[in-house]
Image: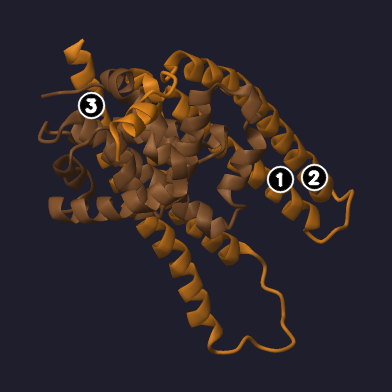
Chain colours: A orange, B brown
């Protein structure tokens, strides 16, 4: 390959970092605004649909709850997507990025803790509900195998999220410690 | 030896941008690739022990990010990238001669297969065979053989431009 080709290749217009950062900042403003609106709208739609259905104004057999939840999930998905875009924008400013990543990891740690802390009271609540709900006379008795199935389902609902929550939290706490160490290192080097 | 993201952006931003352009013809996606590469470099910086040349280190990460992008794009089976290039670029009469030649070179490099494209891009960036081998995890001999093959392929694609 001739040197002329190398020169031609390397002679491209200079990499304009400032222009890129400007564009990113502009995109960020749009994303932040879109993000706020999508979160507010999805929460509002969720609340209205569930409120209508649960108050008995609509008899749609859970369809509205499903739609409301779907809307909330889409809103949440959009929120995460927007966060990723914002994270990219910070790529040239390590200090800002590390703060953002620490916040995000801390939120993930809390989510993991919820995963293993919530199933236990939920199961307790379920037990109390079952224990104190008046028994209805059934025309046909429950089959014998139903008890082990109920126990299996209940245990699965506790064991799976608890294990997942513990594993996830442990991983995220480790990541958080690493990030905090990097942040301390950065502060020290200033 | 410690390097900062700022120094990499200032010294090798152009190289990262050119590598991204050799994988993606659409300017907005090429810019996303640059941002992804910078983010990946920043994340990898705490692990940098100063053994590799910063330029080699940055090029290796940029190539990995670009290859992941190409893999994802090929799974999505999007339309051919080169068609997009012809749609987006202004007509030849509007372009300066050198810019036109650069576009031809870039388009030719994009037509090479991934392995050859990596080698040619780094060679055009001024990397020696040993540095290319270090970046891509190959032997210098292997790089020499592949480079010779890629050169002849590029010569056919470029036609008269390769003789200049």
- Give the residue drawn at x 45%, y 45%: B159
Picture coordinates of residue B91, whole percent (x, y): 66, 30
Picture coordinates of residue A168, whole percent (x, y): 35, 50
Q: Are marks 1 and 3 in contact (CB under 8 Å)?
A: no
User: Does label 3 or label 2 sit earlier along the sequence?
Assistant: 2
The chain carrying label 1 is A
**Residue situated in front as seen by the camera: A144 or A51:** A51
- Crowding at label 2, few (<14), some or many (≥20) Cα neighbours within 10 Å? some
Which residue is identified by label 1?
A71
**Along the horizontal axis of the image, is A157 left or right of B48?**
right
Per the image, label 3 sits on a secondary structure element best described as helix
**Along the horizontal axis of the image, is B74 left or right of A58?**
left
Per the image, label 1 sits on a secondary structure element best described as helix
Which residue is identified by label 3?
A182
Q: Are marks 2 and 1 in contact (CB under 8 Å)?
A: yes
The chain carrying label 3 is A
> Which mark lies nearer to you, 3 or 2?
3
Q: How many badges with numbers are in the image?
A: 3
**Residue situated in front as seen by the camera: A7 or B68:** A7
Marks 2 and 1 share the same chain:
yes
The chain carrying label 2 is A
**Residue situated in front as seen by the camera: A35 or B74:** B74
Q: Distance between the residues labelled 3 and 2?
A: 45 Å
Q: Can residue A128 be seen in this view?
A: yes
Quadrant in the picture for the N terminus of chain A: top left
User: Does label 1 or label 3 sit earlier along the sequence?
Assistant: 1
Which residue is identified by label 2?
A49
Q: How far apart are marks 2 and 1 (CA)?
A: 10 Å
- The quadrant holding residue B23 is top left
- Crowding at label 3, few (<14), some or many (≥20) Cα neighbours within 10 Å? some
């Amino acid at each position: 390959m001739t040197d002329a080709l190398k020169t031609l290749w390397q002679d491209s217009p200079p990499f304009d970092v400032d222009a890129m950062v400007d564009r990113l900042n502009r995109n960020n403003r749009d994303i932040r605004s879109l993000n706020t609106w999508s979160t507010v709208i999805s929460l509002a739609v969720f609340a209205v649909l569930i409120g209508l259905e649960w108050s008995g104004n609509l008899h749609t057999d859970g369809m509205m709850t499903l739609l409301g939840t779907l809307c909330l999930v889409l809103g949440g998905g959009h929120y995460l997507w927007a966060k990723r875009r914002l994270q990219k924008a910070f790529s040239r400013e390590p200090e800002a990025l590390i703060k953002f990543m620490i916040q995000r990891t801390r939120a993930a740690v809390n989510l993991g803790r919820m995963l293993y802390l919530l199933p236990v009271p939920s199961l307790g609540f379920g037990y109390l509900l079952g224990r104190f709900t008046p028994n209805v006379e059934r025309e046909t008795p429950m089959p014998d195998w139903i008890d082990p199935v109920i126990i299996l389902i209940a245990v699965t609902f506790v064991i799976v999220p608890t294990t997942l929550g513990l594993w996830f939290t442990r991983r995220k706490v480790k990541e958080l410690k690493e990030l905090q160490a990097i942040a301390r290192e950065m502060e020290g080097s200033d | 030896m410690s390097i900062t993201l700022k120094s990499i952006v200032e010294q090798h931003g152009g190289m990262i941008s050119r590598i991204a352009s050799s994988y993606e013809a659409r300017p907005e996606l090429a810019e996303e690739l640059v941002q992804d590469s910078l983010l990946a470099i920043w994340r990898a910086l705490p692990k940098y022990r100063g053994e590799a040349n910063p330029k080699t280190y940055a090029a290796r990460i940029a190539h990995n990010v670009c290859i992941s992008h190409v893999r994802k794009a090929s799974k999505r089976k999007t339309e051919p990238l080169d068609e997009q290039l012809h749609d987006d670029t202004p007509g030849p009469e509007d372009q300066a001669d050198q810019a036109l030649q650069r576009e031809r070179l870039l388009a030719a490099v994009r037509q090479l297969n991934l392995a050859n494209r990596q080698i040619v891009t780094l060679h055009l960036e001024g990397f020696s065979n040993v540095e290319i081998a270090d970046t891509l995890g190959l032997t210098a001999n292997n790089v020499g053989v592949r480079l010779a093959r890629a050169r002849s392929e590029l010569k056919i694609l470029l036609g008269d431009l390769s003789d200049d």
